[in-house]
Amino acid sequence: MEEQDLMLDGNDPPFWRTKTLEQMNRDEWEALCDGCGRCCLVKLEDEDTAEVYLTRLSCAQLDVRTCRCKDYPNRFKKMPDCLEIDIARARELSWLPKTCAYRLVGEGQDLMWWHPLVSGSPDTVHQAGVSVRSFAMSERRVKEENYWKYIIPDDGPEGDGIEKNRHRPRAGQIPSEPTE
């Protein structure tokens, strides 16, 4: 099934409105990813509290410019700590953004206006300021003992502004990139 076959055509309701996560085929599941790259951000876990903190550092395999994995088919071989987002994880991972399509559909909600399946363009996720393109940098540029310096608020550098962006575009500020 081609990605364009999954796009809205105006006749039938889209698959994410008629199917549960469990009912989706592999192509539908993959198409549900909005390409924001937020699941590819490095996470730090507090050993005492088990609280997970997101950083503005991305996995070394993420192309921050495109917000796509540099070698998606081999990601688990190249990055042993890469976590596959499956149905169970989509329902349980508290660090998945509120805007994540897997999370939204799993909760019975609709996709955001900027989701490529809704907008018809992979660029709207970036134009809406939702992707990591505007603030992330590769973990390769930072020593591991300094990762804590790159912790960001739960919903990204804009705080909860992304949730406010559910139905219309907004002019986003691009945060400055920290230097090491």
Image: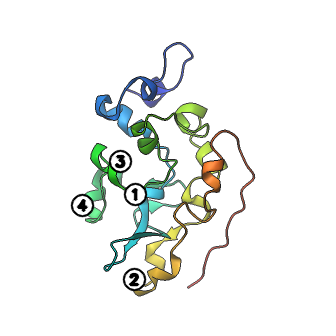
Marks 2,1: beta carbons within 8 A: no
Q: Amino acid at mark 3?
A: Ala
Q: Which residue is mark 2?
A: 144
Separation of marks 2 and 4 at Cα, in angstroms: 21 Å
Q: Amino acid at mark 2?
A: Glu
Q: Which residue is mark 1?
A: 94
Which structural element holds mark 3?
A: helix
Q: Nearer the viewer, mark 2 or mark 4?
A: 2
Residue 147: x and y, percent? Answer: 45, 80
| Other-residue count near label 1 (Cα within 10 Å), few / some / many at <14 / 14–19 / ≥20 | few
Separation of marks 1 and 3 at Cα, in angstroms: 9 Å
Q: Nearer the viewer, mark 2 or mark 1?
A: 1
Q: Nearer the viewer, mark 4 or mark 3?
A: 3
Q: Nearer the viewer, mark 1 or mark 4?
A: 1
Q: Which residue is mark 4?
A: 77
| Other-residue count near label 3 (Cα within 10 Å), few / some / many at <14 / 14–19 / ≥20 | many
Which structural element holds mark 1?
A: loop
Q: Residue at x 61, y 52 (%)?
A: 162
- Is residue 33 depicted above or below 83 in this figure? above
Q: Residue at x 48, y 57 (%)?
A: 38
